Amino acid sequence: MAAHMATLKMKQPNGKKRYPWFSLAVLTGALIFFLLPMYVMIINGLKDAQHVSLSTMWNLPETLSAGGFEGAWKQLGPNIYNSILMVVPATFLSAMVGAINGYFLSKWKFRGADGLFTFILFGFFIPYQVILLPLVQFMQTVGLYGTITGLVVVHVIYGIPVTTLIFRNFYTGVPNELIEAAVVDGGNKYQIFSMIMFPLAVPAFVVVGIFQFTNIWNDFIFGVTVVPNPQAQPVTIALNNLSGNFSVDWNVVMAGAVLAALPTAIVYIFLSRYFVRGLLAGSVKG
């Protein structure tokens, strides 16, 4: 009997790992399919303009040339800098606002807190197009129209619903006994936030940081509406302007698309594992 049970235990792992080659083939095919657009953009960005055509776009370059990337950097460099000036403070500020909102809405509930949280979540359902006209009028009134600072303010405000939701869900999973112990030790609300809750929320900050960085960096409609000056616009709008009226240097356009996508790709590559951990950390109440 013991020998029979041992045989069954030895066979179970093999049964679970049946056909591993099929899963590997599916994942490999999905990876290749996902990387095909990047392959086309990179190899065409390394070609001269005269060697880029529809019939040869899949061919490797005969001679390597940085002409596409060099031209794209010259045209997009200032706009990439504008995007950095926009996305870094906007991501940081929206994360801080969401952390404070989530902390007070989850651990220091006051009268009407749930109603206020529901009201904040309504921001998810407001289309961008609905607020563009009043947004421009307000920006002109306060002197922020046409500036990167105005874009930062817009993205911070529009990021409040999602950042508040993520941090509130995360802080809900923190045991209330931890707060009560800190109160007994003489800590006030702000000390508890800065010394206890803030350090614990690192996974939530990673999730919010990746989410907000990606959304703000890839934004187009607010950038083109709030900042009409091409020299002050983010890189996504400048990338759209690379296409000329009569002719298009496709090697420059392809290289520009790679440069514009590179920051978000780097963020995901280095922080993707923490992104998943942060989502899971806020999904189960402790």
Image (cartoon, rainbow, N blue to C red):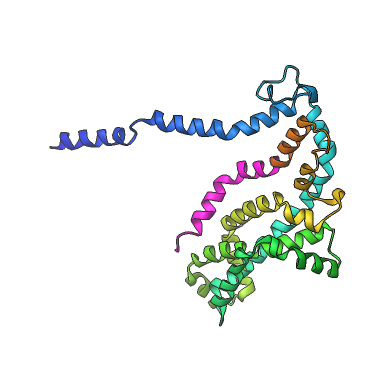
Q: Residue at x 78, y 53 (%)?
A: 224
Residue nearer the viewer, 62 or 276: 62
Farthest-out residue, bottom? 111
User: Above or below — where is 32 with respect to 168?
Assistant: above
Let me know if residue 194 appears in the view.
no
Image side of residue 180 versus residue 104, left or right:
left
User: Above or below — where is 239 with respect to 181?
Assistant: above
Q: Residue at x 54, y 54 (%)?
A: 278
Image side of residue 159 versus residue 239, left or right:
left
Residue nearer the viewer, 82 or 110: 82
Numbered circles on residues, count: 0
Q: Residue at x 53, y 62 (%)?
A: 170
Which quadrant of the figure has residue 243? top right
Q: Say if the magenta span includes residue 23.
A: no
Q: Main secondary structure of the magenta part?
A: helix
User: Above or below — where is 26 with respect to 63?
Assistant: below
User: Above or below — where is 230 with respect to 165?
Assistant: above
Q: Classify the position of the N terminus by image quarter.
A: top left
Farthest-out residue, front? 246
Which quadrant of the figure has residue 127? bottom right
Q: Classify the position of the C terminus by image quarter.
A: bottom left
* Residue 141 drawn at (x, y percent): 85, 70
* Residue 207 drawn at (x, y percent): 59, 54
* Residue 220 drawn at (x, y percent): 73, 51
Image side of residue 121 versus residue 28, left or right:
right
Q: Say if the magenta span includes residue 266.
A: yes
Residue range (magenta) = 262-286
Farthest-out residue, top? 62
* Residue 25 drawn at (x, y percent): 45, 29
Let me know if residue 202 appears in the view.
yes
Which quadrant of the figure has residue 140? bottom right
